[in-house]
Image: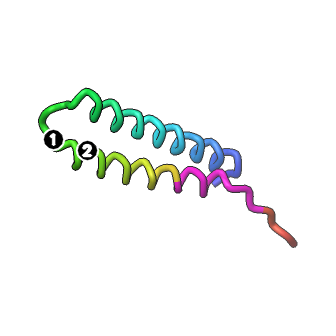
Amino acid sequence: MDKELKKEVGKYFVDVSKLLIGGVVLSSVLKIQGLSNVIVIIVGASVAVVLAILGFLLMRNKTKTN
């Protein structure tokens, strides 16, 4: 994958992670019925953390020494 493409995909994952955190917080504040709030928080936070880690790994600058 091209370095610029990896960087853009990384930024996308970090943005999606931020949106997930916002959604989890909003659903908890609004007390959306249907699923237990604890399950929503655990799943949302877990996915957000995974996407953030993937995003930061893709955005990382690797310098090749030849």
Of residues 26 and 64, which is closer to you in this image?
Answer: 26
Check disc 1 and report its element: helix, strand or loop. loop
Residue 6 drawn above or below residue 35:
below
Instruction: Specify the amino acid type for callout 2.
Output: Val
Separation of residues labelled 1 and 2 (CA atoms): 7 Å
Residue drawn at the location 37% of the way across and 54% of the way down: 46
Secondary structure beneath disc 2?
helix
The image's colouring method is rainbow
Q: Which amino acid type corresponds to the residue marked 1 in the rendered image?
A: Leu
Q: Residue furthest right?
A: 66
Q: Nearer the viewer, residue 2 or 19?
A: 19
Give the labeled residue for mark 1. Answer: 35
Residue 61 colored in magenta in the image: yes
**6, 28: nearer the viewer:** 28
Q: What percent of the width, then of the height, locates residue 66?
A: 87, 72
Tell me which residue sits at (80%, 62%) in the image.
63
Tell me: 28 left or right of 60. left
Q: Are marks 1 and 2 in contact (CB under 8 Å)?
A: yes
**Residue placed under numbered mark 2 in the picture:** 40
Say which quadrant the N terminus sits in: bottom right
Q: Magenta stretch?
A: 53-62
Q: Is residue 35 above or below residue 30?
A: below
Q: Is residue 22 inside the magenta stretch?
A: no
